[in-house]
Amino acid sequence: MRTPFVAAIAAVICSTALIAAPPPPADWLTDGGDPQRTGWQRNETILNKDNVKGLAVRWKTKLDNEPREMHSLFPPMIASNIPTRDGPKEIAIEAGSSDNIYGIDTANRDEVTAILAAPHRIGVAGEVVRRTLDGMIKVAPDGTVRASDRYLLVGRKGATRPDPVQAAWLYAQMVRWGQTPMSADGLRTAMAVFRPDLYDTASGHAGKPMATSDPIGAFAGPAFDPADIAGHLAAFAIGRQKP
């Protein structure tokens, strides 16, 4: 008989496995994409004859370049994983006819922040939204911040890839709050539910190296070792009171 915690974890992994991880960011470092100017994006695997009708402009930005003669802006180059103070970013490099060069963050976080912070949407300070989008999460009243360039990612860098250690962490939290008893069999069952091999096959990454998951660490709390769940739980000051 399947216990509630196993059913809950199974639901999580089933929903995750249905998300096809998109390919990593594809650089476009020259006009036309290659020296032959073919314009062929070899790494594009999402568009097909059935979904291309949904292709649409999602955002745009206005630049202050002054046109000259019949020229203004040239096709942008795309460079991924550019190091910045806010972590790696994908940058569009745009050249203008007035001897201007622009670096544009393709994540477009300023526009997203303004939309989400509006009173009729989330209605919170824009600084809070932007900090979250940048992966800078306050974890304590004293302002301590936990930074992660993988926060709020879907697909890239293996962000949605199930890891049995993640299942062990979920199981540990359920033990902590008295939702299930601690047992070696329960831990093994929980970890067996998360199947990275199935995910890799479904997403077309079987046999290919994948980014490793971040070490498990909640927004607050001690480090996690699946081989020492008792030690992890003992480090918490609060939890379900034992009878």
Image (cartoon, rainbow, N blue to C red):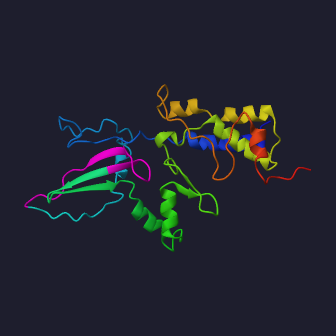
At which x and y percent is residue 5? 75, 43
At which x and y percent is residue 183? 81, 35
Q: Nearer the viewer, residue 202 or 180?
A: 180
Give me the residue at 30% from left, 51% from top. Answer: 92
State the image quarter where residue 8 is shown.
top right
Asked whether residue 50 is in view, the answer is yes
Horizontal placement of 7 versus 88: left or right? right
At which x and y percent is residue 144? 59, 58
Asked whether residue 21 is in view, the answer is no
Q: Which residues are magenta?
A: 69-91
Q: Is residue 185 magenta?
A: no
Give me the residue at 33% from left, 50% from top. Answer: 91
Q: Quadrant of the N terminus?
A: top right
Q: Nearer the viewer, residue 126 or 136?
A: 136
State the image quarter where residue 42 is shown.
top left
State the image quarter where residue 145 is shown.
bottom right
Q: In this rendering, is residue 190 above or below 67?
A: above
Horizontal placement of 16 versus 40: left or right? right
Farthest residue toward the bottom? 119
Q: Nearer the viewer, residue 239 or 189?
A: 239
Give me the residue at 34% from left, 36% from top. Answer: 43
Q: Is residue 70 magenta?
A: yes
